[in-house]
Amino acid sequence: MMFSLKGKTAFVTGAAQGIGRTTAEKLAEQGAAVALADINEAKLAEAAAAIEQAGGRAVPVAVNIADNDSIAAGVKKAADALGGIDIVVNSAGVLGTSSIEDMKRDGEWKRVLDIDLTGTFFVCQYALPYLKKSAAPRIVNIASISGRNGGFESAMSYTAAKGGVVALTRGMARHLAEYRITVNAVCPATTETEMIQGYTPERIANQAKEILLGRLGKREEIAGAVCYLASDEAAFVTGLMLDVNGGAYFG
């Protein structure tokens, strides 16, 4: 089977819903044992139970991605439960809504960067000792088209954070290559998840117009790209920004 992850272990942030949950489900379908990390414990338990019921192995881990002590404890709990960590998927993220004029440093700006960018870095840092021990270590970050081209209607907090994830991915790919750790990112366009439930029909239509294929992305399409980057077939791929955005950005 292509992209088989049998015998691998994965740590997925933002796994209670959206792209993170679907990614955890797809990794489990491909044979990986998965630790699902999120701050929403109720939805986390539900997501883990669904994977178990489908025949996979899932461990729910409560983690506040904006708190380093919580990240450290969550990574250790996952590694202890699974016997190590081979794959890290950084999917935890929040959107911003403030205009440039209304942005507050200690409000939305700090919150979005703490979760989307800083949290991504420190998850990698705390997982690094386990990844170094892995036979096929992988880091896959969920970035965004906003981090590639500035976005269409994105708040600058989100654009800056995801642009940082793009740069972080490339930098870590260089620095961690000596440990055989590949570091890549998936860059979606607007995707059908809970994050856009507050969008008006007009805004969704406008977003779709910016995509050549004329529709929003599906979370399964993003999860499939993650599975590829986590697999042995992608062993010679690192520092890649994989654009899964229906032609909204050509790179």
Image (tube, rainbow, N blue to C red):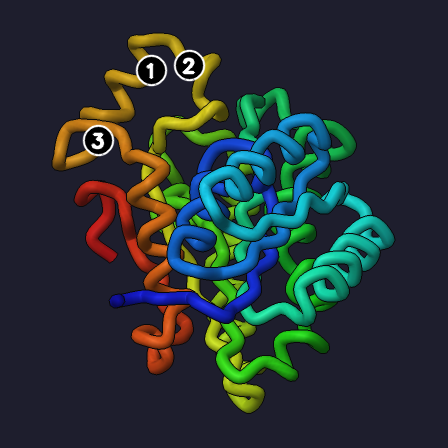
- Tell me the crowding category of disc 2: few under 14, some 14 to 19, or many 20 or more residues within 10 angstroms, Cα based: few
Pinpoint residue 100: horizontal percent, then vertical percent: 55, 27
Labels 1 and 2 touching (C-beta < 8 A): yes
**Helix, strand, or loop for circle 2?**
loop
**Which residue is outermost to the bottom?**
178
* Placement of the C terminus among the 4 image quadrants: bottom left
Q: Residue at x 50, y 30 (%)?
A: 155
Disc 3 from disc 1: Cα separation: 11 Å
- Tell me the crowding category of disc 1: few under 14, some 14 to 19, or many 20 or more residues within 10 angstroms, Cα based: few
Relative depth, front residue between 126 and 83: 83
Q: Residue at x 66, y 49 (%)?
A: 59
Residue type, mark 1 in image: Arg
What residue would you read off at disc 3?
210
Relative depth, front residue between 106 and 213: 213
Please name which of the two marks, 3 or 2, marks the residue nearer to the observer.
Answer: 2
**Residue 78, quarter of the rendered image:** bottom right
Relative depth, front residue between 247 and 87: 87
Residue type, mark 2 in image: Tyr
What residue would you read off at disc 2?
199
Q: Residue at x 60, y 30 (%)?
A: 46
Disc 3 from disc 2: Cα separation: 16 Å
4 displayed left or right of 135: left
**Helix, strand, or loop for circle 3?**
loop
108 displayed left or right of 230: right
What residue would you read off at disc 1?
203
**Helix, strand, or loop for circle 1?**
helix
